[in-house]
Image (cartoon, coloured by chain):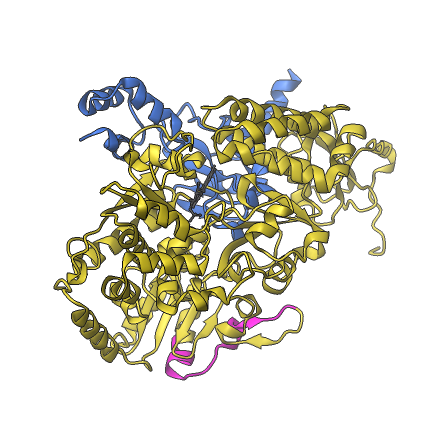
Amino acid sequence: MQEKDLIPVLERIQKKYGYLPLQALKSVARELGVPAVQVYGAATFFKQFRLNPPGKYQIEVCMGTACYMAGGQVALDSFERRLKIGVGETTPDGEFSLERVACVGCCNLAPVAVVDNVVEKNVTPTRVDGILLSLGLSEENKENKENSNAQGK
Amino acid sequence: MALLNSLEELDKLKQELLSRKDPNKPCISICAGAGCIASGAGEVIAAFEAEIKKQGLSARVETKGTGCPGYCQRGPVVVIYPEEICYLQVKPEDVPEIIEETIKGKKIVERLVYIDPDTEEKATLESEIPFYKYQERLNLSNNIKIDPKSLDDYLAIGGYSALAKVLFQMTPEQVIDEIKKSNLRGRGGAGFPAGIKWEGSRNAPETTKYVIVNADEGDPGAFMDRALLEGNPHSILEGLAIGAYAIGAQEGYIYVRQEYPLAVENIGIAIEKATEYGFLGENILGSGFNFKVMVHQGAGAFVCGESTALMTALEGRAGEPRPKYIRSNIRGLWEKPTVLNNVETWANVPMIINKGADWFTQIGTDGSKGTKIFALVGKINNTGLVEVPMGMPIRDIIYKIGGGIPGGKKFKAVQTGGPSGGCLPENLLDLPVGFDELVQAGSMMGSGGMIVMDEDTCMVDVARYFLNFLTDESCGKCVPCREGIRQMLKILTDITEGKGKEGDIELLEEIAEVTGTAALCALGKSAPNPVLSTLKYFREEYEAHIREKRCPALSCKDLIAFYIDPDLCRACMACLRKCPAGAIVGAKKQIHVVEQEKCTKCGTCFEVCRFDAVKKISGEPVPPPLPEEERTLTRKGKE
Ligand SMILES: Cc1cc2nc3c(=O)[nH]c(=O)nc-3n(C[C@H](O)[C@H](O)[C@H](O)COP(=O)(O)O)c2cc1C
């Protein structure tokens, strides 16, 4: 293997482990005979690579232009609010991870999110609730009540 | 399949394929493109296969999952041959009826055909539907006819005859002359004439040369290349092989986004099959020409669509562009002469070779020949892929093909050219689409995104959106791009958040000029376009944001408030229950009120209200809520 195989190799590692473990990056540098900084540079340059393990359910919110105009940001905000994580993060229990992607090519269904490789269409705030409910996250109203109780104290 | 070793063997195979094919045998083509799959085409295909098996029709009826014919809005799309009956929005439940009525009974299932929303006229055939009628689908029309995984299907529609023609009847110079004469301009970006690019490589003294397909398609909101890669991969391979022959390359690369798994799969299968038949590999068709093709998956970086960045990434490094003192057709991949063209550019090549440059130049305008595929998306009735002759007025694309703006809303702008393109206003709707026309108007062709915006779209926010995208995607190598875009984004964000001040517009224009002049690659050079074009045509929206703290499109979160109109509220509790912030007070029969301090402006109440009582307001104070004692709802009319 040579330098030109660097990116395909990283892609294969990510396919296998779901992310790029640091240890693996070091081995790649050794095996291909390229400086570690070049491996790390490529791993952080390309959007596809992640350096931490993904959640059990991977949620990708489309931020293509059509989706953005149809309310993609509202959908993303709703996921962030419900999951209490930001883009690129995984919930502490390892259940959900949240990403933004640039166009999945289903603009007629905008705004869309890809949840575990299935395209969810017309993702409004209430649809976000529905999706998360189907994945086992309980409804927000309950939390709400807890919240308002907490505020009352 | 034995390797084809001569022209005669290819002709024999084609004869055989055609004689085996019964033109009257019913064939059910179901679009298996990304849009239709997301709308449930997978289940429809399975239902057809199951029903045909159940009824013992397998020998008499063919089914095909095909590439995208373009009409995503009405997917899943099903076309039944030989009649070309087109059924739209087909569901698995419809399948038994289609088999019974159309396949067996030769009758139309009326409820599944296209009905014109205005005239209520029905259109049974693909060619009668307005969405298709005004197009000229030189590339896309084959998608629904062939199974992209079958090389025989491609051969049956005349595939690889152009490659055979150049290998046996044309010298490389003649091929280049033909492409030059056709004035085929690049479909991926700047519209550079392909023939001139090829000639440069042909004349370079080196012996090792490369050809590359740019299938990185990173524009958000564009999926033309994807449709060709998924739906007709051999047409791209054939074009690439012709280009390789013309410049004298032995190796080619297809750089395709990893986000397109089906494209990666289909192009992989196509290479395998083409090699097996002898259209790629050693001594192609016995002509002595050798050419092999490799696929490289891009790992998600918009800038890697830029030609020199793409080559850097292919070499195994972070994809940063390089200066172009010497063009890459002279010194490109591994410093060798390299011709890189867009997917659609390559796909046009076999057609030009087959039908001739004279035929090709009859289509289009003086400066722009042939057709162009656009991804027509946004606030438009018929979202989908459309292929039109160059020179068609944008108005016709949006209204005749696209069916206009949904929901009775008003057209505001159309954005072309991808993230660094520009927004064109209503008074430019009659502009003919063409490379030079669009640039003159402050936008560009780009790779063919066409995003329609209506009155609900804030133009300042659109500029901010694109600059946000470009900030993320700027590779950081050169300062004007890295810092210039970031600073413009900062100002735009301030403006959308109500923190804009006098002088911001002028500062934006100044930074735009520097970035556009001094950046290393076209990403930075064209990054100011979204700002400059919106400033040029929609300056008053900027001024409203800055001076009146008002967002005319009622879209910028920090400048709007949600307010429940007491005259319209029916006190149904829907918004109150759903509000995630607990910001709505009220009760059954008690008119609801948004508590502005608590509201996070998530828009849930606006979405769930069935009475249009939730309003967005901007630039004016929120009307004070009704005094509590007046909030009891007295039902008008009913009691
Ligand atoms: C930031 C940036 C992104 C680009 N992305 C693409 C792309 O995704 N696909 C493409 O074909 N060309 C893209 N281009 C244009 C290419 O640099 C190049 O001009 C084009 O692929 C050449 O092929 P053509 O002459 O056939 O159009 C991009 C350019 C820039 C500056």
Residue that appears at 36% across and 49% down: B198
Task: Please state the extent of the stretch shown in magenta in the rendering.
Answer: B99-117
Counting from the top left corner in percent of width and height, residue A139 is at: 53, 35
Residue A140 shows in this picture:
no
Say which quadrant the C terminus of chain B sits in: bottom right
Give the letter of the yellow chain: B
- Identify the colour of chain A in the image: blue
Counting from the top left corner in percent of width and height, residue A116 is at: 39, 41
Q: Where ligand 1 lies, by quadrant? A: top left
Left or right of B482: which side holds B532? right
Left or right of B608: which side holds B259? left
Left or right of A82: which side holds B413? right
Q: Which corner quadrant of the image does residue B51 belong to?
A: bottom left
The stretch drawn in magenta includes residue B91: no
Counting from the top left corner in percent of width and height, residue B528 is at: 60, 34
Q: Nearer the viewer, residue A23 or B306?
A: B306
Q: Quick one: which residue is furthest to the left in this view?
A: B2
Left or right of B231: which side holds A21? left
Q: Is residue B335 above or below residue B140?
A: above
Q: Is residue B570 above or below residue B489?
A: below
Q: Quick one: which residue is furthest to the top in this view?
A: A153
Q: Which corner quadrant of the image does residue B64 belong to?
A: bottom left
Residue B258 shows in this picture:
yes
Q: Nearer the viewer, residue B119 or B243?
A: B243
Q: Is residue B278 above or below residue B585?
A: below
Say which quadrant the N terminus of chain B sits in: bottom left
Residue that appears at 65% across and 45% down: B608
Q: How many marks?
A: 0
Counting from the top left corner in percent of width and height, residue B632 is at: 83, 40
